[in-house]
Image (tube, rainbow, N blue to C red):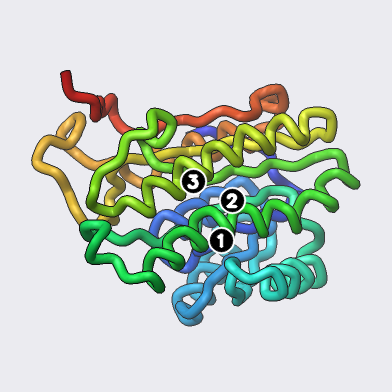
Amino acid sequence: MLSPDLDGRTALVTGSAKGLGRAFALALARNDADVAVHYRSSDAAAYATAEEARETGRGDAVAVQGDVTHPGSVDDLFSEIEDELGGVDVLVNNVGNFAPKHWTDIDHEEWVDVIHTNLTATYLTSKRALPGMRERSWGRVVNVGYASGEKGLVSPKNFPYFAAKTGVLMFTRMLAADTQDDGITANAVSPYVVENSDEFPDDLPRGRPADYADVTQALLFFCDENSAYISGENIEIDGGWLPETV
């Protein structure tokens, strides 16, 4: 596992009480970052993750609550982190709901929720993090996409999720260009099926889903000091999955 030196850096991982977000937070903590464990409603799990993060590395960790789809809540969230840990140097946009239904069976509220938790949240948190990163001339933004998002492949099932994740990858490339002179990088990691996924196809690449370590490896690569020239990139964590048919 890669080991970037994140001592003295503050990281925010959205949606990090459980699952892949939790794995991201703990991986950053193992490399001595101060970690903000964000949650919306899973307070007990978030506090447990923060406690484990403190025990894992040399940095501090706090649990912070907020709705990352609303500007005021995002501002309050960052203000709390800045008061507790300092300015956010590493932002991992992990939050993103999905709707594994045919698009005609998705009601308006669920459609909007999927778009906002994936794309709008990435926009809002990045916008709030950038001024401090620019002031410090250092920052790492890592967004979570979906394998095949760059290809624009979609399905009638779960359509708003695919559309939102493609938007996240477009936003990532834009952000990389917009921060190229600021000491900031913006990249994405895009898993296919991960160990905590709700559905597991019969034909998984390499006979298994990605485990958390497979995905955190890419995150740590982007966070490394020596990755400062790598920006606007997307690593698909898919085991060689080829979704196209011919």
For disc 1, the marked residue is 14
Expressed as whole percent of the image width and height from the top left, the position of residue 85 reads 77, 65
Q: How many marks?
A: 3
Depth check: give the residue in front, 89 or 151: 151
Horizontally, residue 204 falls left or right of residue 171, namely left
Q: Secondary structure at mark 1?
A: loop
In the rendered image, residue 160, in percent from the top left (x then y), is placed at: 38, 54
Residue at screen point 25% across, 44% down = 155
**For mark 3, what is the residue?**
144
Residue in view at x 40 percent, y 73 percent: 109
How many residues crowd mark 1 within 10 Å: few (<14), some (14–19), many (20+)? many
**Which quarter of the figure has residue 187?**
top right
Q: Residue 58: tell me if it is visible.
A: no
> Is there a contact, CB below 8 Å, between mark 3 and mark 1?
no
The residue most toward the right is 135
For badge 1, the amino acid type reads Thr
- Distance from the alpha carbon under mark 2 to that under mark 3: 8 Å
Looking at the image, do the residues carrying marks 2 and 1 touch, with CB atoms under 8 Å apart?
yes
Query: In the rendered view, would you say 138 is above or below 177?
Result: below
Crowding at mark 3 (Cα within 10 Å: few <14, some 14-19, many 20+): many
Label 2: which secondary element? strand
Task: State the residue in front, 16 or 70.
Answer: 70
Q: Which residue is mark 2?
A: 92
Q: Residue at x 56, y 53 (%)?
A: 93
In the rendering, at what x and y percent does residue 202 appear? 9, 41
